[in-house]
Amino acid sequence: MKHHLHLGLGNFFRAHQAWYTGADPTWDITAFTGRSPDLAAALTRQNCRYNLVVRGPSEDRIEPQTAIKTALPGTDLAAWCSWMSRPSVAVLTLTVTEAAYADFVPRRLIAGLTARRAAGAGPIAIVPCDNIPANGSTTARAVTALADPALARWITDNVTFVTTMVDRITPRNPAPGVDVITESFTEWILSGDFPAGRPTWEAAGARFVTDVVPHETRKLLLLNGAHTLLAYAGSALGHTTVASAVADPTCRTWLNEWWDEASRHVPLPAPELLAYRAALLTRFANPRIRHTLAQIATDGSQKLPIRVLPVLRAERSAGRLPTGAIRILASWINHLRGTGAPLNDTAAAPYLDRASSSRAILTLLAPDLAHDEDLLKALP
Ligand SMILES: NC(=O)c1ccc[n+]([C@@H]2O[C@H](COP(=O)([O-])OP(=O)(O)OC[C@H]3O[C@@H](n4cnc5c(N)ncnc54)[C@H](O)[C@@H]3O)[C@@H](O)[C@H]2O)c1
Ligand SMILES: O=P(O)(O)OC[C@@H](O)[C@@H](O)[C@H](O)[C@H](O)CO
């Protein structure tokens, strides 16, 4: 039996990567939480079994999941290093939120890879699955920057960093218990090498490509950017969920405005993008999936640079004043000032210090745009 190791046991991992590995009976999973031990304890109490509740617009499909065999708390560093030292562990996936890549991920990977090298456990593929562009090379850079020269050489020879685009809307489950509610749509596109092998994820529909960029750009701008629009502008109208916002014609107009702008910067054929937009409207409208705007609004200062600013910059360079992108930025600034979804952002403090001035906010968020007077005139 080969092992798939995971860091960041939560809802998304259990609806996505664990589900894909479940399609290959020759692999099993050991998963560590990022921080809180609670989910590891709750899953262990029921032999790591849980149900995936695949929630359609009118009914649920219950899929019992058995691929996870061991669930451990992220606080158990000794167990982490011990699992990282096993030659049978060939793949490590990560879902720890965007915010964790600045510090937690590189530190935890350095500890694990140091132990693996000392144990002579051989090569491994690291597969980040967070909503970050070029997540493979971003993780590689963060890890090698922290490694001493000998470890850095060992990493170059033994570790690959796979870039992935992941998609399956999986909100926090409002009910107690360990079942996971998700949508039926799922997508996983990967690029990179697996020097010690991998589960046959393609058996469940994963796609292996040479270039993830067009796919990740499509997903980050059109899906995540739209979520971010609804999280700030939709919540300011009083909506609390994606489904309720998307049922509002005003929000749908705003979505189309944003999608028209963003689509100009996704390197895929126009018909494919139009089909993706139509599918997104259907996915967002599912009234039985309670995806709260408050959850999506979390950590906005780290999500805007990924989901919105690339479009704003590209549009300004082309001499246009993009009302859709500006609406998202403006509503996030208003969110900092207390409008809409509650503020929950670990990196918000410096923005709050200067929340009364849009120019000061831009100086921190996107200094290259802080002297764009036409843009500033359009901000609150
Ligand atoms: N939920 C989705 O629909 C979805 C879809 C695509 C991608 N993702 C990606 O997966 C991530 C996790 O989503 P989830 O719904 O499982 O979230 P979650 O809140 O269940 O968290 C997952 C894990 O991340 C850990 N974690 C959170 N913040 C951390 C930090 N700052 N440092 C270390 N560990 C931390 C938690 O302890 C938990 O183990 C998202 O942030 C996103 O990047 C989620
Ligand atoms: O999970 P986050 O916090 O990165 O972002 C919230 C949502 O935009 C996101 O989870 C989407 O639902 C997901 O990316 C869909 O695949």
Image (tube, helix red, strand yellow):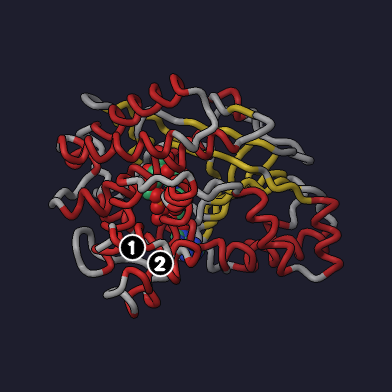
Residue type (three-letter) at the residue carrying disc 1: Leu
Quadrant holding the N terminus: top right
Which x, y percent locates residue 4?
A: 63, 43
The answer to which of 225 and 354 lies nearer the viewer is 354
Quadrant holding the C terminus: bottom left
Q: Can residue 49 be seen in this view?
A: no
Which x, y percent locates residue 235?
A: 20, 52
Q: In which quarter of the image is residue 347?
A: bottom left
Query: Does 139 appear above or below 134?
Result: below
Query: Does 68 appear above or below 305?
Result: above
Residues at marks 1 and 2, CA–CA distance in whole angstroms: 9 Å
Q: Does the residue labelled 1 lie within 8 Å of ligand 2?
A: no
The disc placed on residue 264 is: none
The answer to which of 207 and 211 lies nearer the viewer is 211
Q: Nearer the viewer, mark 1 or mark 2?
A: 1
The disc placed on residue 362 is: 2
Residue matched to label 1: 376
Pointer 1 local density, CA inside 10 Å: few below 14, some 14–19, many at least 20? some
Q: Residue at x 28, y 27 (%)?
A: 282
Q: Residue at x 40, y 70 (%)?
A: 346
Mark 1 or 2, nearer chain start: 2
Query: Does 78 appear above or below 282?
Result: below
| In this picture, residue 144 sits left or right of residue 340 | right
